[in-house]
Amino acid sequence: MLFISKMCLSAQASRQQGSTIVIAVFIIVVMSLLAAALTRMLQDSQQGIGYEVYGTRAYLAANAGIEQAFIRLFPLGGGVGSFCADPDDPPVITLLDLSSQTAFHGCVVTYECQTLADSTRKLYQIDSVAECDAGEFVTRRKIQAQAKEI
């Protein structure tokens, strides 16, 4: 009787040896698919962070263009600069190259000033557009500001 049960056990073990290989291959395939999916998610995350960083740089560069225009429009010594175009004239476009600055690497700003028609005081509108080139992608931000003479 003991001999028969040993034969049955050895027959079952020999039938089950092939299933171990199938299970191991299945586990390797599943783990490879998980690793590929995680790698893709990581790449997408890194690209999203790159867009955010360059978008913020472009926004801050556009703010720098607005500040530069306000400095030209309202000089520190007082008075009003002759920087803005009259209401009937096309706006004067000025280029501010920030690409040599470490924080704004690859960013170029253009800003323009237009005098708007107002019955009591002069109203100025400044448009600033910043474009930051990262090689793979370009981010662009536009800011508009208005000011009145007091």
Image (cartoon, helix red, strand yellow):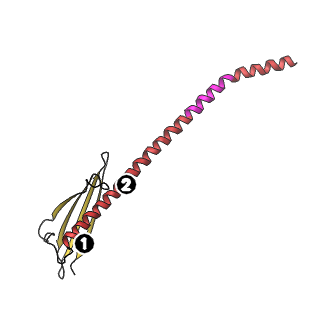
Instruction: Depth check: give the residue in front, 15 or 144.
Output: 144
The three-letter amino acid code for the residue at tag 1 is: Gln
Task: Compare marks 1 and 2 and give the one earlier in the sequence.
Answer: 2
Q: Which residue is mark 1?
A: 146
Where is 32 relative to 19, above or below? below
Magenta region's main secondary structure?
A: helix
Residue at 56% over, 36% down: 31
Question: From the viewer's perspective, is 31 left or right of 15?
Answer: left
Looking at the rendered image, the disc whose residue lies closer to the viewer, 1 or 2, is 2
x%, y% of residue 134?
Answer: 31, 48
Residue at 78% over, 22% down: 9
Q: Is residue 21 magenta?
A: yes
Q: CA distance from mark 1 to mark 2?
A: 27 Å
Instruction: Depth check: give the residue in front, 89 or 135.
Output: 135
Question: From the viewer's perspective, is 86 left or right of 100?
Answer: left
The three-letter amino acid code for the residue at tag 2 is: Val
Q: What's the magenta region?
A: 17-29
Residue at 37% over, 52% down: 51
Residue 8's image quarter?
Answer: top right
x%, y% of residue 121?
Answer: 19, 80
Q: Quadrant of the C terminus?
A: bottom left
Helix, strand or loop at disc 2?
Answer: helix
Q: Quadrant of the N terminus?
A: top right
Q: Which residue is mark 2?
A: 53
For the residues bearing labels 1 and 2, Cβ distance under 8 angstroms: no
Residue at 25% over, 56% down: 98
Where is 79 relative to 89, above or below? below
x%, y% of residue 68?
Answer: 23, 66
